[in-house]
Amino acid sequence: MKHQVAVIRQPARYDDGLVQASVAAAVQALGLRWTDLIQPGQRALLKPNFIRQSHTDRPGEWEQIITHGTVIAAVARAVAEAMNGRGTLTIADAPQTDSDFDAICRRTRLPELRTELAREFPELTVELLDLRREVWRTERGVIVERRKLPEDPRGYELVDLGEKSFFHGKGGRFYGADYDSSFTQRHHAHGRHEYLLSRTAMDADLFVNLPKWKTHKKVGITVSLKNLVGINGDKNYLPHFCLGTPDEGGDEFPDNRVRNKVQSRLVSALKGGPWWTPAVKRVGSKIFGDTSKVVRSGNWHGNDTTWRMVLDLNRAFFARPRRYISIVDGIIAGEGDGPMEADAKPCGVLLAGTNPFAVDLAAAQLMGFDWRKLPMIREGITEDQVEVVPELGKVFQFKPHFGWKGHVEAD
């Protein structure tokens, strides 16, 4: 069976009319109508990429970092019309734990969208949900405050993939999002591989994936597959890399140098304790190099952990039949040190499809990357299973993250 992928081109600007036309054209190119996907009285979930409110170092830049509000609005209105204004439309994500969900919503004009939809469709319930259980305040990447959140109002589903996990048979000391790596290791040990998935996402009648088209430091690119990280409510269930150097069974660093072994042990010992402060981290950056210039924390092409976690989430989500469509915001994409320090890449493209592997394969080819060098895609599909409508045409030569340079580009 061939999975179709629509590639729609428009000027590289977020004009409401242009974006609405492009979204409509993408769905039509797939031979679909919104009424094929959702009916009145049902519940649709729109899942944008809301990783962070802005570029990490340039707070005025954000259009290449998160899904743009015009794309969300165009899809929301089309879905609301297909529902005949009756049902529940939820816009939800679990951003990075130290991100500001309210600031993201303001930047994408979601409060205004909710007001407009309420006026246009008075019987429609519109929800904006932060799916995280906890938010952090950080200084220079060091957690200085933790605050509990209301969580998903429909709760969470603990999913154990067991032997079906892509981690089955893989050893290593898994590191998640927090300093206490033992938490992550407990949920990925003794045959268990557990994830904490949002019931709002899992139980939706229609799931509309709205990724941002970007490079990524740990998996090469982030499009449809990687965007499902945002349906997991606690980032510490997600292995990001394995501690140590390659000869120690780790993928934290790209080589076995003694300084990397020392750095791994020293940071692991300090993190989470009273000595781990922004000042100490600043000194460490001077000694071992800044993360924006030095490969560490699994930010390289040899990361053998994150792609498995991403595919686990997709395997858990698609374990039962889904009404699903992915519409990728590549009008202004992100290249270089993505996902949060990406540079703007104006492309004027929307991609769409009903199979996340097919969409991501087409996205990788358009970026000038070889999808076979991306295990996140390679392990799920082959090229003869993908049909692009129309042909790809112009390829945008994306600059990869520096930890992937020379290892992901097409020959």
Image: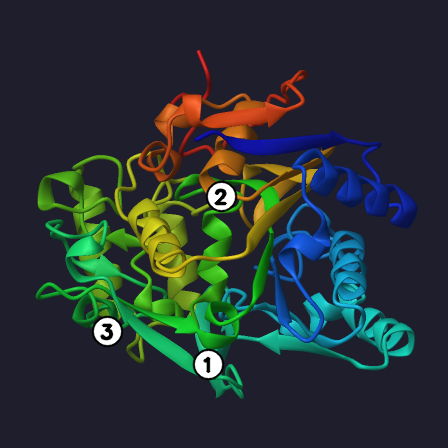
Residue tagged by mark 3?
183
First along the sequence among labels 2 and 1: 1
First along the sequence among labels 3 and 2: 3
Residue under the point 18% across and 37% down: 257
Q: Which disc is residue 133 wearing?
A: 1
Q: What is the CA distance from the residue labelled 3 to the residue labelled 2?
A: 30 Å
Query: Would you identify the image quadrant in which residue 106 lies?
Result: bottom right
Query: Would you identify the image quadrant in which residue 47 lies?
Result: bottom right
Residue tagged by mark 2?
356
Q: Which disc is residue 318 wearing?
A: none
User: Mark 3 or 2, which is nearer the eye?
Assistant: 2
User: Mark 1 or 3, which is nearer the eye?
Assistant: 1
- Residue 379's spot in the image, x, y percent? 31, 36
What's the residue type where badge 2 is placed?
Pro
SS at badge 3:
helix
Whether residue 324 is situated above or below residue 271 in the rendered picture: above
First along the sequence among labels 1 and 3: 1
SS at badge 1:
loop
| Number of residues whose C-alpha sits closer than 10 Å to that of mark 3, classed few (under 14), some (14–19) or many (20 or more) | some
Whether residue 331 is situated above or below residue 91 in the rendered picture: above
